[in-house]
Image: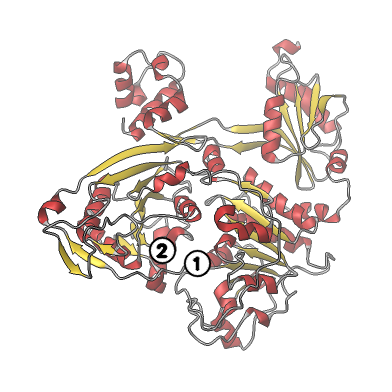
Amino acid sequence: MHAMHETEADTRANRIDPVLRDAGWGVAEGAQVHRELICPGRILGGGQRGTALSADYVLSYRGRKLAVIEAKRAGLGHTAGVGQAKDYAARLQARFAYATNGIGWYGIDMDGGIEGDIALPFPTPEQLWLRCFPDGNDWHERFGAVPFETGSGKWQPRYYQHNAITAVLEAIATDRDRILLTLATGTGKTSVAFQIAWKLFHAKWNLSRDPVRRPRILFLADRNILADQAFNAFSAFPSDALCRIRPEEIRRKGGIPRNASVFFTIFQTFMTGAGDTEDESTAAQFTFEGYEPDFFDFIVIDECHRGGARDESTWRAILEYFKPAVQLGLTATPKRDVNGDTYAYFGEPVYTYALKEGIGDGFLTPFKVRQMASTLDEYTYSEGDVVLEGELERGRVYTEADFNTRLVIDQRERSRVQEFMDQIDQRQKTLVFCATQEHAARVRNFINQIKDNPSPHYCERVTADDGELGERHLRAFQDNEKTLPTILTTSQKLSTGVDALNIRNIVLLRPVTSMIEFKQIIGRGTRTFEGKDYFTIYDFVKAYAHFNDPAWDGEPLPPDDASEPRNPRRPSEREPGVPGGGIREPEPPRRVVVKLSDGRERSIHYIAATTYWSNDGRMITAPEVMQQLFGDLDALLKDEDQLRAIWSDPADAKPSSSASRTWVTTASVWTTCGA
């Protein structure tokens, strides 16, 4: 067949595949050739996605992705795929990228910046391996020899998960002892931690670097639900290899557990023997000093920005005590301006995958923001208002930060609840963030008073004070097969640790001053679920200003030089605990309770505006969404009547062009935007 008439499939089968086989790819032991779906494409709505990205050839050897090849048909120039090859190699963190039409070959060294035409024969697996790893580090091969635990094919690493696992193992292989990994909420940090532990366990890596025994690994969290989720996620390990450290078990057995390989606990357990509720009020019966400093070879610190790495944290003493261990910090939101100690302790992240990337790739769900403004966003006393409790400062302007902490106006909160309950689909799972635990209880009651669903368990409160009852409500909420409870109210606790896929609404009824907490709250809704095109944030507190902050989803700033900690405090037996979740609820100030005059209550009105998050991280309007997704609609549509016809019945629409998928998606997105 003449080259000009070949299809790309012909070129690959007749020209490229034989070259790779002759070089040993797909033939030599450990040398794999596969086509890889890099990402499925951004979720657009109406069941449609953006363009998926797939690499034609990914060459892997000993578990490492070494090269990407972009193929074009023989009738095109051999460098036609150079741009794609470089992009895919960068995403997959492969050292080499190649473009070919089966006749000519063009190679790029992504690290060295050297590129140009190459002559055949194509490099063998061993040749590419030695170019990537000339130092002969045995741990590269030992880690690569351990395959991922896929659960009989049920789990396959996404490209960024593979990158994260590889980056951590590379750091371990090169003797780095403090490692930071930054992955957006909902991208599978626990799965990544499991695969890292799996490879360390089976490769028999340990602090001695002599593979004669399996490592002792510790997973540290600050909340029981996070430790329990991790314990369950590690179930592929032999049962006798896993140990959930609980103080009551230690007391019952009369000693600390030592015979397992992977241990799970919370910081509070290592600080005291109080029990599973993280209550430190009882006398300490057990501390981390029950283990030798070098007992653990590898420690995973989940959500490390929340305490373990802070210089002034009592928990920091635990990490310092186990100083010999290699320590991996996992976080979704390390930011130097509010959390510099994370960087100072762990150093620069070995790999980062941001929320913006996850949404752009289609692994996370996009969102829209309903900005809710009312005629009572501020309060000053008016004649006719009744002070039911406390002393009101006449003439003072009370702002959002005062409501439900210093100032309580039930009519205002009831009207807010009525407003968002009127707007949401009341069958959809929703999280409501409130100012205090008491505020969360009042909002729960208001919701249950006006809901359509007859169940008394439609809305429940989950806060620190709710203890095990709250944990049961949370577990039921996270179960996708259960519809009750449908709405949870909370104050601080549920900003993390909610692994629910089908959250469709997040309601903000309290200010969010921390960028870290803001990203965590947004992350509660980003997990994908069948039929979930987006989730909605109902913002009553102007939190949307965070979207314009450069720290919202920018690249992590460079770390300060690592320094010695500033005298970390020892855990104190007298220090109060944090019941039910590891997040301390602030003590409420003295409050004033006001009842509005009848006329003022009836004058509360709301104005809503909807904005969306663009591909480049800006907040944009609905028309801008359409422009970004589809370009100039005037060029696509003949007239307004055609748009209305497509919008009303997209399945039967007959577009004048061949882009039928675009027409259907256009109609769907217009519906989503509320056009």
Indicate the amino acid at tag 2.
Leu
Instruction: Provide residue 370's location: percent of width, then percent of height.
Output: 34, 42
Instruction: Provide residue 135's location: percent of width, then percent of height.
Output: 88, 49
Instruction: Provide residue 407's location: percent of width, then percent of height.
Output: 27, 63
- 101 vs 342: above or below: above
Q: Which residue is mark 1?
A: 225
- From the viewer's side, name the closer residue of 479 and 638: 638
Query: Which of the 4 quarters of the picture holds residue 643?
Result: top left
Residue at figure coordinates x 86%, y 55% from the top left: 138
Q: Is residue 16 left or right of residue 184?
A: right
> Dot 1 lies on which element?
helix
Q: Quadrant of the C terminus?
A: top left
Q: CA distance from mark 2 to mark 1?
A: 10 Å
Residue 377 seen: yes
- From the viewer's side, name the closer residue of 597 and 614: 597
- 552 vs 383: above or below: above
> Badge 1: how crowded within 10 Å, few (<14), some, or many (20+)?
many
Q: Earlier in the sequence, mark 2 or mark 1?
A: 1
Q: Which residue is mark 2?
A: 474
Q: Is residue 398 left or right of residue 433?
A: left
> Badge 2: how crowded within 10 Å, few (<14), some, or many (20+)?
many
> Dot 2 lies on which element?
helix
Indicate the amino acid at tag 1.
Ile
Query: Which of the 4 quarters of the picture holds residue 633?
Result: top left
Q: Quadrant of the N terminus?
A: top right
**Residues at marks 2 and 1 touching, judged by CB atoms closer than 8 Å:** yes
Residue at figure coordinates x 26%, y 41% from the top left: 607
- 382 vs 367: above or below: below
